[in-house]
Image: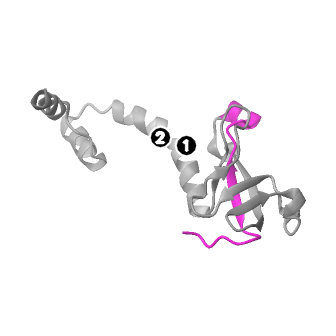
Amino acid sequence: MTDIKIGSECWMIDRDNWKWRQTRRAEDQIKSYYIVGENKRSWLIGFKDGIGRADRDAQYKVDKKTLKTLGGNRDGWGPPRFLFSAKDKDDWIWLINNHHRLAEYIGGIQNADLLRAVAKVVGYKDREVEDEVRQTQT
């Protein structure tokens, strides 16, 4: 777990960002925020100039235990998600920028041995095995 304290930078995944809708690049989906204050149960998140003025400048509350955003629905997207470490941010960017392309690439593999090796690495269960399990359950 990252050492979170007042003044720490965090990043919000903003799926409603106009630039993200145009480019589909994860870098355009992330906005920088800061921990501007805290109370007993929550981190208060806002812009950098709000540090020390959290009582009036906090934009979001995040539960300290779960790190989930508290509050209601935000423009139909639900509460935003925050990332609290540079590694989490880098991982999110890599996933968004690569998971569809990787799925397409794997879908194009025509070598059964290679595809079996990929299946084993990701824990994929063979369809024949799933069918056998389903038959024994009925």
The disc placed on residue 75 is none
Residue behind mark 2: 99
Above or below, comparing residue 62 to residue 106 in the picture: below
- Between 5 and 9, the one lying in front of the other is 5
Point 41% across, 35% down: residue: 103
Residue type indicated by callout 2: His
- Label 1, on which residue? 96
Q: Residue at x 68, y 34 (%)?
A: 23
Point out the image quarter for the N terminus.
bottom right
Seen as rendered, the residue at the extreme front is 40
Q: Do tag 1 and tag 2 residues touch (Cβ < 8 Å)?
A: yes
User: Is 24 placed left or right of 17 in the picture?
Assistant: left
Label count reads 2
Q: Which residues are magenta?
A: 1-23
Figure quadrant of the C terminus:
top left
Horizontally, is 49 left or right of 83 in the view?
Answer: right
- Three-letter code for the amino acid on which mark 1 is drawn: Ile
Q: Nearer the viewer, residue 1 or 78?
A: 78
